Amino acid sequence: MRILGIIFVVLSLICITFAKFFVKTRLFFGDTSMIKQYIWGIILLIPGLILLYFSGAFTQ
């Protein structure tokens, strides 16, 4: 569950951060609008953080 959460978080960070600069990631996600890229990033980030929370990644 932790690995799946990490994958979601990494994909969301790629979508939010790098899609602005790299055209290939824009074409991969099929987005042309920056607002759509932020929405997709948030959609991927929320389940990723939930999976990380339930896997115990934030506990000491």
Image: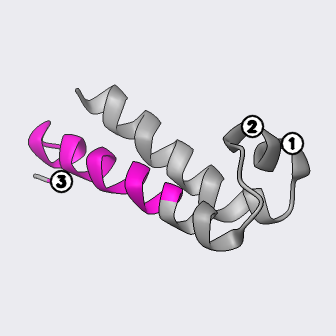
User: In the image, is residue 45 part of the stretch drawn in magenta?
Assistant: yes
Q: Which mark is residue 24?
A: 1
Q: Which mark is residue 50?
A: none
What residue is at 86 percent from the left and 63 percent from the top?
Answer: 21
Prevailing secondary structure class for the magenta stretch in the rendered image = helix
Q: Which mark is residue 58?
A: 3
What residue is at 86 percent from the left and 42 percent from the top?
Answer: 24
Mark 3 or mark 1: which is in front?
A: 1
Along the viewing direction, whichever of 27 and 59 lies nearer the viewer: 27
User: As shown in the figure, which amino acid type bears the numbered disc 1?
Assistant: Lys
For the residues labelled 3 and 2, say whether their Cβ atoms are less than 8 Å apart: no
What residue is at 62 percent from the left and 61 percent from the top?
Answer: 37
Q: Earlier in the sequence, mark 3 or mark 2?
A: 2
The Cα atoms of the two marked residues, 1 and 2, are separated by 6 Å
What residue is at 71 percent from the left and 53 percent from the top?
Answer: 31
Q: Which mark is residue 28?
A: 2
- Secondary structure beneath label 2: helix
